[in-house]
């Protein structure tokens, strides 16, 4: 990437910060805005002063999005696979920036519903990019995939953007396919003057308050401890990279700023992972979570069966490119991320307003 606009970037204490001026009144569209990451991103953009439109559907309950009154955003319900409606909402929003997050994101669910997972994650991405071709104001498109797009060699090193794609489970394969789809759409349609810049972003497991998804460790932990039960852990030795949801979201936002300004092509794919030392086994995360929770909280191991055993045993990404080319670096180490998440759920169960808890984390994050 050219570093030509680096001088305009906002650095403090050596780390780049989000360019808050860039986002004031900036029009953006978030797909999957009712989901966990989408809700945090929509609230972050709203706090930054952007004019956000959301497009997605979600009938889960409880749902963080429904518990929050997010200001400065337009709420559109629809399926990303409905091309005409998706295109209409995108054009009507006048968005200059598009963040595509809508997806079926759970590995275990992808074994139960491989067809739905492939439809949402592959054809959904095709249709979002097709809509993006017709949106006249669009300058930047950020397609969210996953660290699971890499062919998993179970090695100790972090995967780089240039490493081989793979994915033996349907979720991972669908996200790797979304990468190939995006690469093809860029080469075929977006690498032309006047077209928006498009990139994919690959992050791993994120944590933070208000995620109620099944089969994820910290939501499982919060549900158990919130009801005075012990947390049951399926794979205590599984090592994962852990990071607070705001850290990759901050990276997506900075990448969008650069894509919107870029005079020359930028790398097509970006990893946003935690420091390698923050890839910790599940048992250590469970220890951190119950210790922050207090009140005698505890966890224990139980066998998760064949499907649980199918989850990849080690995955970490190398984020050198994002550090060097964007100036991005994670804000919170794993201990802080887990402690903040545990405190979020503990305070939620004690009756705190979820929006004030999200805003507390966002304001601390922006003030770092
Ligand atoms: N949470 C993580 O740890 C994690 C890790 C890596 C990648 N990701 C990726 O980040 C993105 C967001 O994940 P999340 O954790 O917020 O998941 P989520 O399930 O909470 O959010 C996804 C949202 O998209 C919606 N959606 C799904 N299919 C749709 C469709 N066809 N049309 C419209 N809306 C649809 C869902 O209902 C949900 O509201 C996903 O692309 C996911 O694969 C998440």
Image (tube, rainbow, N blue to C red):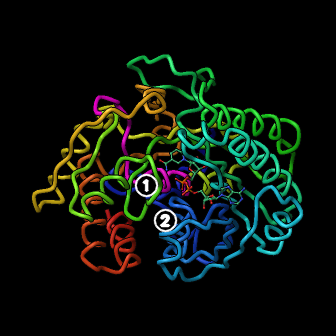
Q: Quadrant of the C terminus?
A: bottom left
Res 163 quadrant in image: top right
Query: What residue is shown with label 2?
Result: 40
Number of marks in the rendered image? 2
Q: Tag 1, which secondary structure? A: loop
Left or right, residue 291 beside residue 191 = left
Residue 318 lies within the magenta run: no
Tell me the tag on residue 227: none
Residue at position x 73%, y 65% in the image: 96
Q: Are marks 1 and 2 in contact (CB under 8 Å)?
A: yes
133 relative position to 26: left or right: right
From the viewer's side, name the closer residue of 194 and 164.
Answer: 164
Residue 245, labelled with which disc?
1
Q: Residue furthest left?
A: 296
Quarter of the image for residue 256 reads: bottom right
Q: Is residue 172 above or below residue 256?
A: above
> Which quadrant would the N terminus be assigned to in this image?
top right
Q: Which residues are magenta?
A: 236-254
Instruction: Report the side of 24 relative to 268 (left or right).
Output: left
- In this view, 68 is above or below 63: below
Q: Position of residue 86 (x, y in %)?
A: 81, 64
- Residue at 60 percent across and 33 percent down: it is 172
> Within 10 angstroms of label 1, few (less than 14), some, or many (20 or more) residues?
many
């Amino acid at each position: 990437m050219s570093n030509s606009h680096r001088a305009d970037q906002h650095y403090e204490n050596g780390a780049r910060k989000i360019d808050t001026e860039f986002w004031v009144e900036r029009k953006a569209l978030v797909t999957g805005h009712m989901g966990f990451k989408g809700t945090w991103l929509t609230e972050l953009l709203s706090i930054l002063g952007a004019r956000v439109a959301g497009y997605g559907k979600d009938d889960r309950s409880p749902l963080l999005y429904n518990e929050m009154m997010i200001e400065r955003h337009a709420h559109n319900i629809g399926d990303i696979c409905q091309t005409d409606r998706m295109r209409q909402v995108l054009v009507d929003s006048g968005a200059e920036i598009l963040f595509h997050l809508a997806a079926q994101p759970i590995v275990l669910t992808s074994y139960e519903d491989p067809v739905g997972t492939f439809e949402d994650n592959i054809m959904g991405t095709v249709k979002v990019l097709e809509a993006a071709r017709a949106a006249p104001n669009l300058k930047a498109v950020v397609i969210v995939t996953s660290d699971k797009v890499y062919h998993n060699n179970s090695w100790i090193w972090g995967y780089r953007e240039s490493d081989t794609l793979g994915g033996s489970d349907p979720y991972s394969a669908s996200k790797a396919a979304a990468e190939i789809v995006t690469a093809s759409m860029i080469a075929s349609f977006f690498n032309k003057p006047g077209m928006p810049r498009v990139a994919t972003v690959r992050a791993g497991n994120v944590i933070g308050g208000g995620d109620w998804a099944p089969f994820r460790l910290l939501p499982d932990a919060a549900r158990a401890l919130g009801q005075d039960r012990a947390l049951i852990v399926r794979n205590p030795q599984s090592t994962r990279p852990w990071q607070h949801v705001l850290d990759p979201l901050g990276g997506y936002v900075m990448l969008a700023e650069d894509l919107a300004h870029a005079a020359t092509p930028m790398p097509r794919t970006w990893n946003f992972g935690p420091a390698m030392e923050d890839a910790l086994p599940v048992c250590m995360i469970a220890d951190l979570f119950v210790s922050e929770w207090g009140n005698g909280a505890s966890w224990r191991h139980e066998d998760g069966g064949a499907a649980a055993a199918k989850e990849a045993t080690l995955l970490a990404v190398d984020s050198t490119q994002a550090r060097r080319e964007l100036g991005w670096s994670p804000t919170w180490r794993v201990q802080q991320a887990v402690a903040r998440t545990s405190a979020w759920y503990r305070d939620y169960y004690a009756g705190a307003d979820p929006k004030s808890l999200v805003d507390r984390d966002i304001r601390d994050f922006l003030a770092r």
